[in-house]
Amino acid sequence: MAPSSDVIVLVLGVVLASLYLFRGHLFNSSPKSNTTVTSVNKEENGNGNPRDFIEKMKAGVRHFLLPFYYILNILLQKKRLVIFYGSQTGTAEEYAIRIAKEAKSKFGLTSLVCDPEEYDFEKLDQFPEDCAVVFVMATYGEGEPTDNAVQLMQNLSEESFQFSKGEHKLDGLKYVVFGLGNKTYEHYNVISKQVDQHLTKMGATRIGNRGEGNDDKSMEEDYLEWKDGMWEAFARVMNVEEGQGGDTADFAVSEIQDTIAPEKVYRGMFHSFPTIEHSFVYIFVPGELSARALTRSKGIHDAKNPYAAPIALSRELFQNTHNRNCVHVELGIEGSGISYQHGDHVGVWPSNPDLEVERLLCALGLSEKRDTVIGIESLDPALAKVAFPVPTTYATVLRHYIDISAVAGRQILGVLAKFGPTPSAEAYLRSLNTRKEEYHAVVTEGCLKLGELLQLAAGDDIRATPTTANTTAWNIPFDTIVSSIPRLQPRYYSISSSPKLNPNSIHVTCVALKYDSACSRIPPRSVYGVGSNFLLNLKYAANGEIGSLVSQGNESLFPAYAIEGPRGAHREGSIYKAPIHVRRSTFRLPTNPKSPIIMIGPGTVSHWVVCHV
């Protein structure tokens, strides 16, 4: 044990070094936000290359004002992670962020979470010995990399590609791999396997086992089973000890007291906001700013800039609609610049249903504050970016930006348990969090959303229309909700029209998802799919119809949506619109029209077969 005088000298030395390193921030007369960040922009990094992740890693420690405990942690440990994600729909990105957060909470390590499309990989052979790189890779289509990972895979696989030292070698590089796939497809998790093989061939060393998540069953459970063993191996290889981090917030949420012009409050829609040099647009997609919108590019609509397509025609295909519906919707794309080919998919961006928005507002004690204007600031932009534009409102976040309609994840229950309004409510969530079988029997089989689970834990009736009178309020900080729930994503459908016959419209044909929950331990109720029932609502509205109510107990509930959009942006008179974009597919028919093909279309897939014949 070192003498106490040595400890004092060490701490004093660290304090003085910290004061010197950050003197420009500590003694600057202009106020600075006391936030922890590890990424830099071009101005803050001089003339640095924004595509150089090695430079950003170093700059993160060199230039920014950090809380004192964090300065100590960085100066004494100096361990860092760079996490690359190959993501097509946002799921891989979410898991990349989860890994970064756990590295911070377990070991106090800071991370850079990077889209590989935005970086060059020549300097991958310059990784410091006390750092590691994590690859979270989804497999897309027929065993292909996601769009943002194409260049990364080419650099890893082509032996002609040389890193900065003039060789195709990565000796000494330490890495972790987690893959996302679906076992119903032939090339299950092939991209993560290829990353692992390429890195091993180049001399890199894998930490722990390669993780594989199967979306056909439970990606969440696969991740939870893999991560514990991986972190044990990580601590051993990287020589770090668990317990060095802390339970710190990712975001700071503040209620804005000053009066703000209504048009400057984001409510989930397209907005323009002028700057000195540009006029740019905050787009509908949950919180992402389209770089293309900065230049006012027209006719470019994709996952970062969906198009509000007018509904040209919609109809019901089933004669008996008592228990199920099959909706056919034709979306106009004339003049949008959108084109499509056979085999492509259309992404429809729904909102969360009114019922779930109201339920969670009541469960969080925010029903009376639904329209309160809030600001959200990231406390670590390199780790957690605010995924939607601000200022906004509580209700807007729950309706348009985060996926409150998904089944509540097991890991989040451990975070929320400590906010239980009663000891029994806290114990209930902790039991579901720690007991995998119990979670599966109640939450998974019962298809319980977060709002329903909070009600159930507090002893409330989940079948009744939620109000402040029948829903117990939990004192959960809203920053925890924003941090813990993933972004609301588009729902993808096979396009059921031919680009030859219908070049100016995209047709969607789908069964509205509705089924009874399978759990006998909770009150029986109907479960509704978000995207398909959003389209069903649009069909009702476009045709001036009224959807039949679904009776549950003493209450009548129907998954209604705010289909007119924020400030009525998705309605013009009797015309309703749906935000969409096209996702390209690699599937193509043979170029020779005489080539024999066999096509099997079970159920609603038959419409897809017809449009290809």
Image: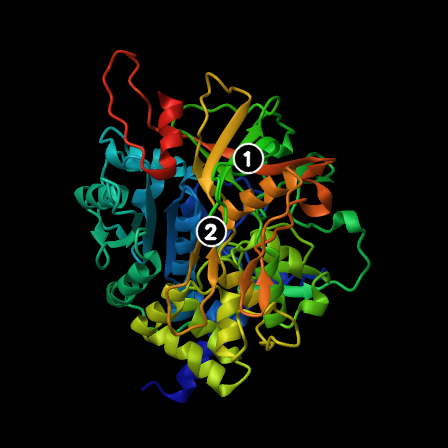
Quadrant of the rendered image containing residue 467: bottom right
Q: Is residue 163 left or right of residue 291?
A: left
Q: Position of residue 490 (x, y in %)?
A: 50, 44
The circle on residue 447 is: none
Q: Please tell me how many numbered marks the rendered image carries.
A: 2
Residue 328 visible in the picture: yes
Q: Is residue 228 left or right of residue 69?
A: left
Q: Calculate the distance from the C-alpha at mark 1 to the C-alpha at mark 2.
A: 17 Å
Quadrant of the rendered image containing residue 105: bottom left
Q: What residue is drawn where x is 67% and y is 45%?
A: 565
Q: Is residue 564 above or below residue 462?
A: above
Say which residue label 2 marks.
323
Instruction: Please tell me which residue lies in front, 581 or 545.
Output: 545
Q: Position of residue 215 (x, y in %)?
A: 32, 51
Quadrant of the rendered image containing residue 288: top right
Instruction: Please tell me which residue lies in front, 386 or 75.
Output: 386
Q: Position of residue 169 (x, y in %)?
A: 22, 40
Q: Amino acid at mark 1?
A: Arg
Tell me which colouring the rendered structure shows: rainbow
Residue 66 visible in the picture: no
Q: What residue is drawn where x is 59% and y is 30%?
A: 313
Q: Could you tell me which secondary element the residue under label 1 belongs to?
A: strand
Say which residue label 1 marks.
315
Q: What residue is drawn where x is 51% and y is 68%?
A: 452
- How crowded pointer 1 is (Cα within 10 Å; few <14, some 14-19, many 20+) is rated as some
Q: Position of residue 416 (x, y in %)?
A: 49, 73
Instruction: Please tell me which residue lies in front, 185 or 542.
Output: 542
